[in-house]
Image: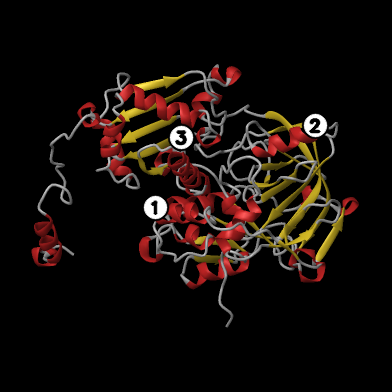
Amino acid sequence: MAELNPALQFRDFLQALKNENDLVEITEEVDPCLELGAIMRKAYESRLPAPLFTNVKGASKDLFSMFGCPAGLRSEEFGDHGRIAHHLGLDPKTPIKDIIDFLLDCKKKKPIPPKVVSFAEAECKRHIIAEEDIHLEKLPTPLLHQSDGGKYLQTYGMWILQTPDKKWTNWSIARGMVANDKQITGLVIKPQHIRQIADAWAAVGKGDEIPFALCFGVPPAAILVSSMPIPAGQSESDYIGAILGEPVPVVKCETNDLMVPATSEMVLEGTLSLNNTFKEGPFGEMHGYVFDNQDHPCPLYTVKTMTYRDNAILPVSNPGVCTDETHTLIGSLVAAEAKQLAIDSNLPIIDAFVPYESQALWLVLKVDLKKLQELKNTPEEFSKMVGDLYFNNKVGFIIHEIVLVADDIDIFNFKEVFWAYVTRHTPVADQLNFDDVTSFPLAPFVSQSPRIKTMRGGKCVTNCIFKQEYVGKLDYVTCSFEKGYPKDLVNSINENWKKYGYK
């Protein structure tokens, strides 16, 4: 049997999960109207195996089965971050800290551009539907949450857009709702790269005829990297090649010059119009709410051709209360870029993480106290330095609170982070506000307040490092089992645990 390559091949990714008892094939008919979404939410919140829906009500033979919870957390048996590790071709038991460091190490590798393959080699070209025969409203597109404003076909697919001069090709994730039989609408907002490229087309007078492709079931490494806030102008495809150690096979679209992953399950292609809009939303987003009457006019994508492979599978993400892809991918990948920014800026930061429990609104930075003391900053000066750096960078766009903790805290353990948060800062006094930076419009406290009109401020840096630690050592003992007793005693108790009568 050929060795699986789950980072490159979506079908291999599914097989790897199946081999680890982390996939449940649901053959009972499931209604895409709420039932499918509800099953996914239960699987996410209970860390159950990922569901593969092979009998979706209203589906045809090839269009389509659905796969849910592609990057949700799972039980510890095969690694709680195993699905994310498989996206990168790593051992499934790789912890999230090592996953973040792996991504940063890959930045040092030589980029590997994609390779063009023939139509005959491209699985996504097995079936081709022309514009006149496209009927998006007949597809079994899921209604994922009560009160969603429509059916969202695009929750875990990858948009591909390219600047008019073809110097920058962007692969990214942004939600997409079926507007009518031929069109999809979705968020195209600043400062996201998809908007930057769209604006480049508008600048040359072609804001209503922007070529796009929307690809589903792409290489898992590609969908992961498309969530990363990498710098503008850098093409994700080359970085993905560095991660894989080989080029991503791509094939030309039918109606434009864009190149799409050849192994994709489905590809929709056509043109985006910035001026032709449709009411999009509301939608249950990454922070766990659906607010009534929160629709917005958004640009329309007109689908002119659809290509797909035999027995196509649509990957689906159903955002909500943690933990789902909007936390495990977006949050973790923001953390990776945040750590890189700290390295590039010579900040005394050991690690960075976006805790899932924060719904991707916090960035926690673990500070090297020795190096911090060498800076001779006051807490206020250091907080300002950090806030100025992150809140004026794309990395900090979705973040509203940066939490600084000392190097005795495991920032990948939310219990420790929260303990430090509630015991090591004085509310208000140890928080530095930033009122002239861009707000994140999807944050509920922004979207549901007058701040949505200005899109400014509402961000802060919270200093959870004791003031004494900025100038020297502060002696204290942490009153916990692991940290509050001699190491030899801890090891002895662990070895004798069953003797005490515990299982």
Q: Residue at x 47, y 40 (%)?
A: 341
Could one spot residue 274 in this view of the protein?
Answer: no
Name the residue beneath numbered marker 2.
Answer: 202
Three-letter amino acid code of the residue under disc 1: Lys
Mark 3–mark 2 distance (CA, rounded to whole Å):
32 Å
> In the rendered image, which residue does mark 3 sit on?
361
Q: Earlier in the sequence, mark 3 or mark 2?
A: 2
Q: Which amino acid, by three-letter code, is at mark 3?
A: Leu
Seen from the viewer's position, the closer of residues 96 and 75 is 96
Nearer to us in this view, 32 or 288: 288
Quarter of the image holding residue 196? top right
C-alpha span from label 2 to label 1: 41 Å
Residue 2 in the image, given as x and y percentages of width and height: 59, 80
**Residue lying at 56% horizontally and 53% vertically, measured from the top left:** 224
Upstream in the sequence, badge 3 or badge 1? Answer: 1
Residue 45 location, x and y as percent? 44, 50
Q: Is residue 145 visible?
A: yes
- Quadrant of the frame with the C terminus: bottom left
Residue 439 in percent (x, y) is at 54, 25
Label 2 packing within 10 angstroms: few (<14), some (14-19), many (20+): some
Q: Which residue is mark 1?
A: 97
Q: Residues within 10 Å of mark 1 (few under 14, many from 20)?
A: some
**Mark 3: few/some/many CA within 10 Å (<14, 14-19, 20+):** many
Q: Quadrant of residue 274?
A: top right
| 199 left or right of 353 in image | right
Q: Residue at x 26, y 39 (%)?
A: 370
**Is 275 located above or below residue 82 in the figure?**
above
Looking at the image, is mark 3 or mark 1 nearer the viewer? Answer: 1
